[in-house]
Structures are given as C-alpha cells and as structure tokens.
Image: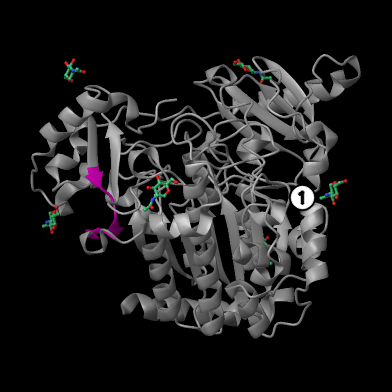
Amino acid sequence: MKIRVTGAFLFNVLCTISYTCCGETVGKRPPHIVMIIADDMGSNDLSYRGLDQITTANLDAMGFNGIIFNRHYTEPICTPSRAALLTGQYPIRLGLQGEPISAGEDRHLPPDVQTLPQLLKELGYTTHLVGKWHLGTARREDIPKGRGFDTHYGYWNGYIGYFDYETKSAMTITSEVYEGFDMKENFVDAWKDKGIYATHIFTEKALDIIDAQNKDIPMFLMVGHLAVHTGKNGMVEVADEKTMNNTYGYIADLERRRYVDALMNLDDSVGRIVEKLQQRDLLQNSVVIFMSDNGAQIRGIFHNGGSNYPLRGEKFSHHDGGIKNAALLYSPLLEKKNYIHDHLIHITDWLPTLYSLAGGNITSLKKTDGVDQWLSISQNKPSKRKNILINIDEVKLYSGVIGYGGRYKLLNGTIQSGFYDSFTGEPQSSNKMDYDIAAILNSRVNKAIKKSKVPGKHLDEALIRNLRKSSSAIRNNSKCNRGTEKYEICHHFCLFDLWTDPCETENLIRQKSKDDIVLNLKNQLAEFWNEVSPQTNKPVDINSDPAKYNGTWCTWLDDEFCIKIKTNNQNKNCNENNRSTSSIPVLKL
Ligand SMILES: *[C@@H]1O[C@H](CO)[C@@H](O)[C@H](O)[C@H]1NC(C)=O
Ligand SMILES: *[C@@H]1O[C@H](CO)[C@@H](O)[C@H](O)[C@H]1NC(C)=O
Ligand SMILES: *[C@@H]1O[C@H](CO)[C@@H](O)[C@H](O)[C@H]1NC(C)=O
Ligand SMILES: *[C@@H]1O[C@H](CO)[C@@H](O)[C@H](O)[C@H]1NC(C)=O
Ligand SMILES: *[C@@H]1O[C@H](CO)[C@@H](O)[C@H](O)[C@H]1NC(C)=O
Ligand SMILES: CC(=O)N[C@H]1CO[C@H](CO)[C@@H](O)[C@@H]1O
C-alpha cells in the first residue's frame, strides 16, 4: 500500500512538472509501455513477412495498424540481447557478451548499471516483469525485484519446461546435470501453477496486472514469453497435441508443427493483452512493442523448427538471420502509422527512446549506446544511428560491426567453424495457404484498436496486401534465392553490402574498390575492441544445487529465504545424466 501511495505521489509531482516545463509533452501523461518478447523466434515466422503456412493475425494486425520494423537489430543470443534491452548498453560494456548465463552460474548485470525499469520507476511508473529474466540469480539483488521491477512472475534462468517449469544445468566441475523448479511469484515458488501451459499462465498474469493497474499511474509491463524456445526434452511443447494435429496436421514436419502451434498461442497472447488494454481504457495512451530476442535456432542444441528465411544464419550467428529480427510497434501516439520502418534501429535504442517518451531527460542518463529513435519511429524519419556494434566475443574470437547507415557489414571471424552461418531455415511455403485477411480484420488486436476510437486509418484488404507485399519483398531478391548452397564462411574478415545483397551471399572483402570502406569499418571495430570489458563467465556453482533447496533453483549466495529442504534428487539426476548425457539440453557452445 505504501508503495502505491509513493508511486501516485511521484506521478503527481512529475505531472505538475510536465505541465509547466516540457514543451511538447505539456498536458500529456506518460504512456503505458508494454513490451512483449518472443524467445528464439525466426524473422520468417510471422505471416506479414510472406509466410504462407499460417496467419499470425494478431501480430500482423499490430504491425499493420502501427509499424513493422525492417531493420531492427538485436544481439545474436539471449543474455546479451536482454542485457542490451534493459540497460541501453552494448553487452561488451557489461561483461555479458558471451554465452548465456547458466542456471547456477554467479553472473549478473553489473550492480551500478541503470536498468530501464529502474529509470521508469524514478519517473513514477509501476514496473512488472512476467516470464523470462536470464540476467543473474545468485543473490536477491540480482533478480528482477533487485533490478527495478516491482513485481515478477516467471522464471529466472534461460528456459523451462512448458508444463513442469523445470530447468537443467551442467555442473562445470563434476559435469553432473542438476535440475530444479524455476517458476517464481517474486521469491515464492509457484508450485500451485505447475501443469499450466507456460504461455497461458504468463498471459493470465499479464492480464491480471493490467486489470489491477491504477489508471492514473503509468505502467511498464514486460512479458518475456518462453515461446517459441524449446522446453522439456529439447522440444517446443504444445498446449494440446490433439488440437495441434487437428489444426496444423497439414504441416508434415512435426517439429515445425509444434513450433507453429506454440507460436499461434503466442499470437493469441498478444491479442489478449492488447484487448485488455483497450477494455481498461489504457490503449489510447500506450506504446506496445513486440520483438524476438534473437533469430531462430535452426540446427544444433535448442533447434526449434523456426525459420529466418531468406536471411543467412541463425541464433549465435552475426549474419542477419541471427540479429535482424522481427519487431513491431503499435501506439496511438505515433504521428505516422501503417508503414514499414526501414531505418537502422538497435535493441539498445529502446532505453533512451522509452525513457524520453516517459518524460525523462536523456542527457541525464549515465551512459548509453542507444539513440532516442522516437522521431524516426513516429514520423518515419531517417535514424540518427549511423552504425551498430554487432557484438565482440573476445573468448570465442568473433566480432562484427555495421556501418554506413546500415549498408555495410564487416565481420571478423566466426564460431564453430561457421556451423550457425549458413542455414536460413525453410521458406515454409510448401503448404500454401491463402493469407487469411478476414482473420486479421477479426483479430483481437484489430478489433481492440478499432474500438479504442483513435483517429487514423482502419485496416482494409488493400492496405493489408500492400503492406505485406512491401515487407516480404526480400523474398523476391534474386540473390536471396540460392537455396542451401554453401556460402563462404567468414573465418577472418568479410564485407557485405546489405542493401544490394541482404542475404550476405557475396564476400566483398577482396574488392579493391571497397578498401576504404573496409579500413573505416576495421577502425570502428578496433575501437570497440579497445573498450571490451572482459567476460565475467564462471563455472556453474556446485552450491546452487537445487537438491538442497527442495528441488528449486534459489538465490543460493543469499539463501536465508530459500527453502532448505534436501531432496534425494541428487542421485536421481546423476543416474539420468549417465543414461542420456548427449540428449540433455544444456548449453555448450
Ligand atoms: C500427432 O501427430 C503425430 C504425427 O503425425 C503423431 O505421432 C502423434 O501421436 C499425434 N498426437 C496425437 C495426440 O494425436
Ligand atoms: C536535461 O539535462 C541537462 C543536463 O542535466 C540540462 O542541461 C537540460 O536543461 C535538461 N533538459 C530539460 C528539458 O530539462
Ligand atoms: C514476387 O514475385 C512474384 C512473381 O513475379 C510476384 O507475383 C509477387 O507479387 C512478388 N512479391 C513481392 C513481395 O514483391
Ligand atoms: C579481429 O579479431 C581478432 C581476434 O580474432 C582480434 O585480435 C583483432 O583485434 C580483431 N580486429 C578487428 C579490426 O576487429
Ligand atoms: C517442496 O516441494 C514440493 C513439491 O515437490 C511442494 O509441494 C512443497 O510445497 C515445497 N515445500 C515448501 C516448503 O516450499
Ligand atoms: C556409463 C557412464 O557414462 N558412466 C558414468 C556415470 O557417471 C560416473 C560419475 O559421473 C562416471 O564415472 C561414469 O563413467
């Protein structure tokens, strides 16, 4: 109760200030911000991009009513991407540029770094995380409530089973695999919810938060869905197999069928969230953002059946299939809507963009690699961003930069001899379905937007077909249709012209005419190399063993609140490990 009063008080102070001082924002209330993140979703997997297998009606409707980002870059893997999103800094500043954090590994966001929820809280927002965290769990101060979120319902580590909420980790020293429950309502184990499909429980919790929101206080709600990451036994789990078979039986590849079913549940979740915002009368002052944290994983551990077609590469890769990901935004505050945003934008840009939109003064931010993109987004103006550091992994020795306003990409090395660099995933157009325009018009998102009576164009068939055609134009790029032909792997330096060759089929590094460009990009990249803060990766800590904590992952370095009940899981896990080491989905790059 006390916190609410403080929030309302802060908001009133802020409101007064904005009435007297802040130019454009006079009289306006800070918008509600809702951010929905998909896990390992491919850029080809939403139907607005030309996919002819399903119609992701809610997400398509969100993009068509708002904005579809065509050059939205993230990091190539989960922990770095989420760190960049929440801090507005390149992961090399945080030591988080390498492998994702393992369960039981003592690694986290640096304590002094500002996070988006912390900053928004200072501006009077209530801040909520539902779903995935994956930015440190060893101490209470490392988890969401310690890093700026008022509430968290969800999991702390990289992924869980969709029903049993268990996750595993390989003890680095003994190489045993430990398993524990990882679903928390703040600090309390959410045993009562075990068995409910993860996408459903996260949706329910998000709706509860919107229902309970005081309308006079701005809200930041981040929903980190488990979908469409793999769950138990390295598979994407579905809500109900029979329904899946009935609905998507026309998709022969069972892995793909599962993925599609999980994705359609995610699409429905977005529909319900936007619908609830409208029902609560919050939508007309909201910014709703959807994105994937990185590209789909096509091969190797955690492969999920997603597709980045026709972009080259997948999760982990510095090619665009790993980093140029699906992203959408809907907001009545946009001055221009219904368009494809083709300007350069990076995941670090959200922090300054949203902070500023919320009434913050970005010159007071301690440090950011992000750029305030609101003008570019809201008015379809060129981006102020000229380059992007893709990432530098100084341990695996691969790095890359994009310069010249997004045109040229320089890569320096790869991982696993290019294992992740060639596959795009299937076009997924073999099961040709008619694009379901009616489903989009009748989607929860489209109906909610119509009902909210915000001035602007309503979707119709012509507008939908037009936008879809523009956003899937890349499928007709002649260079992009070279099938599964092997491309040159970037063992050392490579240069690509992303404007003429968006699928990165031709390495231009040996072209004399490109020498200046190469030199310039090498200099930019070398500068970033000088700024790398070394990776803080640690072995998985044997003391984190869930067997000590009633079979749960807990904040083991700060365990006064952990349930200290020993289970006999330790032996069980050892045996399991012995039986099936090769099929256990724990990450080893
Ligand atoms: C769904 O279909 C797959 C393959 O066609 C089959 O193996 C599986 O048993 C089916 N599941 C159910 C519940 O019918
Ligand atoms: C933002 O902060 C800077 C530096 O603290 C200050 O000079 C500037 O006047 C502030 N701008 C606004 C609009 O308050
Ligand atoms: C791609 O080319 C085909 C055949 O020329 C054409 O029918 C289709 O409209 C084109 N698609 C796009 C997105 O330009
Ligand atoms: C390229 O990568 C190597 C490590 O493989 C590194 O030593 C070198 O500094 C990098 N050069 C540039 C220009 O990024
Ligand atoms: C311990 O775990 C069981 C599930 O295995 C759960 O039902 C029980 O509530 C837990 N005990 C405590 C004290 O949290
Ligand atoms: C068959 C097999 O893999 N056995 C292993 C089971 O685990 C113990 C201890 O970790 C190993 O020593 C065995 O080799």
In the image, residue 182 lies in the stretch drawn in magenta: yes
Residue shown at 35% from the left, 59% from the top: 197
In the image, is residue 287 above or below residue 228? below
In the image, residue 412 lies in the stretch drawn in magenta: no
The amino acid type, in three-letter code, at marker 1 is: Ser
Residue shown at 87% from the left, 16% from the top: 511
Task: Tell me where residue 23 sits by quadrant.
Answer: bottom right
Ligand 3 under 8 Å from disc 1 Cβ: yes
Q: Is residue 197 visible?
A: yes
| Ligand 2 quarter of the rendering | bottom right
Q: Which residues are magenta?
A: 180-190
Q: Is residue 133 left or right of residue 380?
A: left
Q: What residue would you read off at disc 1?
A: 472
Instruction: Return the x and y of residue 466 as percentages of the image width and height.
Output: 83, 61
The residue tagged with tag 1: helix, strand or loop? Answer: loop
> Of 225 and 515, which appears nearest the observer?
225
Instruction: Return the x and y of residue 122 as percentages of the image width and height.
Output: 48, 66
Q: Is residue 47 left or right of residue 472?
A: left
> Which residue is outermost to the right?
513
Task: Tell me where residue 239 sits by quadrant.
Answer: bottom left
Q: Quadrant of the N terminus?
A: bottom left
Instruction: Return the x and y of residue 299 as percentages of the image width and height.
Output: 52, 30
